[in-house]
Image (cartoon, rainbow, N blue to C red):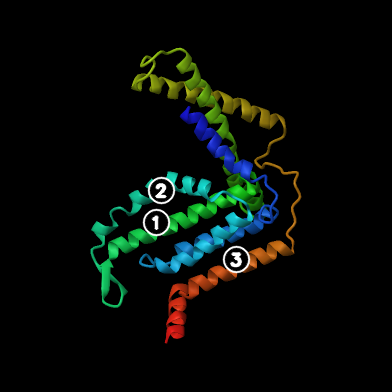
Amino acid sequence: MALEAAYSDIGRLDRLSYKDTAIHRLDPRAKVVATMLFVVAVVSFPRYEVLSLLPFAVFPVLVAALGDIPAGFIAKKVLAVSPFALFVGMFNPLLDPGTVSILPGATVSAGWVSFASILVKFVLTIGAALLLIATTSFPGICRGLRRLGFPALFVSQLLFLYRYLFVLMEEAMRVVRARDMRSFGSRGAGPRVYVRIVGALFLRTVERAERIYGCMLARGFRGEVPSMREEKLGPADGVFVLASGSFFALCRLVSVPEAIGRFVRGLAG
């Protein structure tokens, strides 16, 4: 069943976060801060910059390698959400008819350059976010955000959204499985049936949410999800953040591809 495959695929990110590697052992706050710096540095580039973005790929590649994260799995997840970026940038070639010089005597449409910039930024930022989840776990990210000073209400909402996404999918699988057992061939399919399934799923979701909230209040919930884990920032965390931030600043302030090109021309001359 496609829904069960999607459920297993989402849960694999959490299973990857249970590994014991140098990246996994870092404090969640260090990884969250490094990823935030990475995203800010990437999105801060002008819309006609493409080549200058490429050196930033070193960060996710190193994180995936040191964290033993399958590159193919992350690539599939990025491709699954890439239609959003395609939809955002597909009109750039039409709305931006100017030209941009990429080489001496060679010009291309500015719209296609900005479109390529959107795609590169999308791949880099989404890939970094997925790697953060795969090496930290979503609850670990929420703990890191809370200890960085983010509002408790915001962090709790993120945590509940992620946790009960799996509950909602399990409920949907039960409803769909029941429909399959009561139908044969093309019977039990069609818009009317799917509307009823969505309605039944909505009612079950509301009822379960009320029960869960009542249980949380009975256990002393006051707007913040407590954590029993004690995590401390160590020297390795500081080195990771400092090295990452320095690399991002270097790639942002210096055009690495141009510097490499000048260096190669100097050697050739």
Image disc number at residue 267 = none
Q: Mark 3–mark 1 contact, CB under 8 Å?
A: no
Which residue is painted at 64% across and 46% down in the image?
17
Farthest front residue?
268
Q: Amino acid at mark 1?
A: Leu
The answer to which quarter of the image holds residue 48 is bottom left
Q: Mark 2–mark 1 contact, CB under 8 Å?
A: yes
Q: Earlier in the sequence, mark 3 or mark 1?
A: 1
Position of 211 with respect to 233 (left or right) is: left
Image disc number at residue 244 = 3
How far apart are the two marked residues, 3 and 1, measured between alpha carbons? 23 Å
Q: Is residue 71 above or below residue 190?
A: below
Q: Earlier in the sequence, mark 2 or mark 3?
A: 2
Where is residue 106 drawn, in percent x and y? Answer: 27, 73
Q: Mark 1 — residue?
A: 119
Position of 86 with respect to 129 (left or right) is: left
Q: Earlier in the sequence, mark 2 or mark 1?
A: 2
Q: Secondary structure at mark 1?
A: helix
Q: Amino acid at mark 2?
A: Ser
Q: Mark 2 — residue?
A: 82
